[in-house]
Image (spheres, coloured by chain):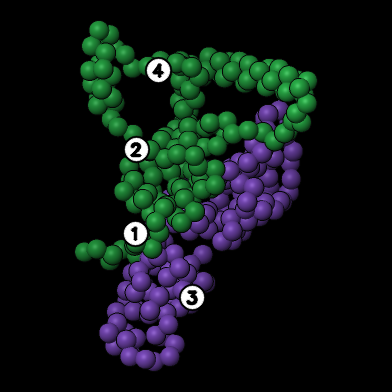
């Protein structure tokens, strides 16, 4: 039965990306270097960890708020992937959080808000980060450091 | 099917390409290669803030600048179908040879056969595709 399907990768050849074999056809959270969080079903991948995601949503999370956007099929270039993780079903999560904190009835940490709200919150966050960065840079320059203009990873 | 196979299948379809810089390109895929280099036509380019738009009749993207691509849902189904077809064709053309002259050292067949038997590994597949003479049929 094994290896009759030529689209299946023999897991021995690859030591790293091959670990994704177990994740195929499962619902995954993929975090990209720019901070984006994609939730979708992994349909295939290759040795560079290029990923094919189906029925993907992009989830924007700011502090304790989140909002989802329907996106569809993604081909993600492996370089940009920070992490890939399987998503535990919501029920399990719920029991987990409730068992950790039986005092609180519903302690799922995130609250869903509208897209407009999340965009506003996200913009605020970006502005804040930029301001912090500027202050930090000017302080660093004051004490004689040179500043790296390259954008940092956002995740 | 592999990500790059899916990309090949997307030729002729509209797609959205986001570059690492955050710029996006909306256009029809004309061609692509194993490095994910793309040529697109009828492109709308958007700057990273999404505030400015440019219309380009065609453009070339070097693969290393790509963050991700978004393709239409149908493309997955099309790719799956093609994959199935190809596999059936292969089975038909290869089965009689298996354990036959492929295993004995007849020059041409042996090479491809070896690669094919390693089964689906990327390297093996690449070899296999040539052996099928499948370039033409593949796209």
Please name whichever residue, A111 or A63, is drawn nearer the observer in this view of the structure.
A63
**Which label lies toward us, 4 or 3?**
4
Dots 1 and 4 on the same chain: yes
Which of the marked residues, 2 or 1, is nearer the chain's N terminus?
A: 1
Q: Which residue is mark 3?
A: B130
> Which residue in the protein does label 1 denote?
A11
Screen quadrant of the N terminus of chain A: bottom left
Between the C-alphas of marks 2 and 1, the distance is 19 Å
Q: Residues within 10 Å of mark 2 (few under 14, many from 20)?
A: some
Marks 2 and 3, Cα distance to the nearest angstrom?
36 Å
Q: Which residue is mark 4?
A: A110
**Residue in the foreground of this view, choosing between A122 and A150:** A150
Kindly identify the residue that appears in the image at 28 percent across and 66 percent down: A4
Mark 1–mark 4 distance (CA, rounded to whole Å): 37 Å
Of tags 1 and 3, the one toward the viewer is 1
Residue topped by disc 2:
A86
- The chain letter for the residue carrying disc 2 is A
Is residue A99 left or right of A128 when viewed as pictured? left
The letter of the purple chain is B
């Amino acid at each position: 039965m094994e290896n009759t399907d030529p689209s299946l990768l023999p897991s021995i050849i690859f030591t790293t990306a091959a670990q994704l074999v177990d994740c195929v056809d499962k619902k995954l959270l993929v975090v990209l270097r720019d901070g984006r969080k994609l939730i979708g079903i992994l349909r295939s991948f290759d040795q560079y960890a290029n990923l094919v995601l189906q029925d993907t949503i992009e989830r924007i999370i700011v502090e304790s708020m989140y909002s989802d956007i329907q996106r569809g099929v993604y081909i993600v270039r492996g370089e940009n992937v920070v992490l890939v993780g399987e998503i535990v079903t919501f029920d399990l999560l719920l029991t987990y959080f409730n068992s950790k904190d039986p005092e609180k009835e519903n302690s799922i940490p995130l609250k869903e808000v509208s897209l407009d709200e999340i965009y506003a919150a996200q913009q605020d966050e970006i502005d804040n980060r930029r301001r912090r960065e500027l202050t930090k840079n000017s302080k660093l320059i004051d004490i004689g450091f040179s500043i790296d203009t390259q954008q940092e990873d956002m995740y | 099917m592999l990500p790059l196979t899916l990309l090949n299948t997307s030729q002729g379809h509209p797609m959205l390409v986001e570059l690492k810089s955050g710029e996006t390109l909306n256009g029809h895929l004309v061609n692509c290669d194993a490095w994910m280099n793309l040529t697109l036509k009828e492109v709308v380019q958007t700057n990273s803030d999404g505030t400015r738009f440019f219309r380009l009749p065609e453009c070339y993207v070097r693969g290393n600048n790509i963050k991700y691509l978004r393709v239409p849902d149908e493309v997955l189904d099309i790719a799956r179908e093609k994959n199935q077809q190809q596999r059936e064709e292969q089975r038909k053309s290869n089965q009689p040879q298996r354990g036959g002259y492929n295993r004995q050292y007849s020059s041409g067949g042996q090479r491809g056969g070896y690669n094919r038997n390693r089964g689906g590994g990327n390297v093996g597949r690449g070899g296999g595709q040539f052996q099928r003479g499948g370039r033409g049929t593949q796209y």
